Amino acid sequence: MLNRKLLLAVAAVGLASAAFAGGHNDAGCGLGSMLFKEDKPVHQIVAATTNGSSGNQTFGITTGTLECSSGGLIKAGKEREVFIGTNFRALEREMAAGKGQYASSLGALMGCGANTDKFLSFSKAHYETLFPSAGATPETLLENLNREIAADATLSSVCGV
């Protein structure tokens, strides 16, 4: 009886973690899904148990191996939207000054990486275009930022937008 409850608990944990594994069958990505490919309930339970009990699904999602994507739950574009929406007022102040941790983080999210200083200078120089009015929204900032970076030959070559 105890073994059966333990097996059900492990299977439930495996299936719950599979929900974060991308567009695969019920067991998600991972070694278990690679070994047990059939879409029958028994195979999916064994695959999910293998994935959940060994931790290989987490490894696969993190590294982009074992037929898992490395994009995570929030893709880059969505991550930018969420970050700007959450930190909009701080970004407005810091981008006007051309410095600050929020603006630097946004530069990194925009793909500027080691060229964050160029992004900060750019944001200060283009502040009025990025924030065209007092009623600017996070959505307009992101649209304007994407457009202005694409139009700037120097920044578009160093940022991965």
Image (cartoon, rainbow, N blue to C red):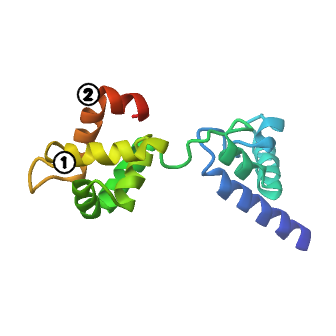
Q: Is residue 106 above or below residue 22?
A: below
Q: Residue 65 in the image: x percent, y percent?
A: 72, 38
Q: Residue 57 in the image: x percent, y percent?
A: 73, 49
Q: Residue 147 in the image: x percent, y percent?
A: 25, 33
What amino acid does circle 2 point to? Ala
Looking at the picture, tell me which residue is in the foreground, 33 or 80.
80
The dot on residue 36 is none
Q: Which residue is mark 1?
A: 127
Q: Residues within 10 Å of mark 2 (few under 14, many from 20)?
A: few
Do the residues under discs 2 and 1 have CB atoms within 8 angstroms?
Answer: no
What amino acid does circle 1 point to? Tyr
Looking at the picture, tell me which residue is in the foreground, 5 or 32.
32
* Residue 36 lies in quadrant: top right
* Residue 29 lies in quadrant: top right
The dot on residue 151 is 2
Q: Earlier in the sequence, mark 2 or mark 1?
A: 1
Q: Residues within 10 Å of mark 1 (few under 14, many from 20)?
A: some
Residue 19 in view of the camera: yes
- The quadrant the C terminus occupies is top left
Left or right of 145: which side holds 74?
right
Per the model, the C-alpha gap separating discs 2 and 1 is 15 Å
Number of numbered discs overlaid on the protein picture: 2
Looking at the picture, tell me which residue is in the foreground, 131 or 157.
157
The structure residue drawn at horizontal position 10% and vertical position 55%, both measured from the top left corner, is 135
The structure residue drawn at horizontal position 42% and vertical position 33%, both measured from the top left corner, is 158
Disc 1 element = helix
Q: Residue furthest bottom?
A: 2
Residue 1 in view of the camera: no
Q: Residue 8 in the image: x percent, y percent?
A: 79, 63
